[in-house]
Image (cartoon, grey):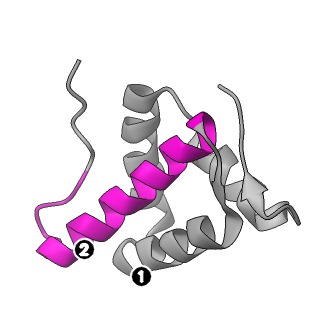
Amino acid sequence: MKMEMPISFDWSKEEVVDVLALYQAIEAVYSKGIDREELLLKYRRFKEIVPSKSEEKQLFKKFDQQANVSSYKAIQSAIKSEQPIIKLSN
């Protein structure tokens, strides 16, 4: 099954690449784990591209449904955790 990553056609090519990098990082949280700082760095970049909380929720909802993950839980884990590696199970 081919996933359609939720992106905006208003974004530049670089912004699309950066948002896709966050999606991949979130998937990594649920597969092999990811460095906490790397995930937070990608999320901060995402927030530069998508400052609107409601747009963030819409994008995450679409992504979460396709990838069977919770972007919110992944980000919150990284924010609240002291662990260097963030790994969650579905």
Q: Which of the image's four quarters has the C terminus?
A: top right
Instruction: Pick whichever of labels 2 and 1 is earlier in the sequence.
Output: 2
Give the number of the disc on residue 28: none
Three-letter amino acid code at disc 1?
A: Glu
Q: Residue at x 65, y 46 (%)?
A: 33
What residue is disc 1 on? 48
Crowding around mark 2 (Cα neighbors within 10 Å: few <14, some 14 to 19, many 20+) is some
Q: Give the spatial CA distance, label 2 vs label 1.
A: 9 Å
> Where is residue 46, by image quadrant?
bottom left
What residue is disc 2 on? 15
* Percent coordinates x, y for residue 16 in the rendering: 22, 65
Q: Main secondary structure of the magenta part?
A: helix
Instruction: Report the side of 54 relative to 75 (left or right).
Output: left
Q: Residue at x 13, y 69 (%)?
A: 10
Nearer-the-camera pick, 84 or 12: 84
> Where is residue 48, by image quadrant?
bottom left
Q: Residue at x 37, y 37 (%)?
A: 62
The residues colored magenta run 7-31
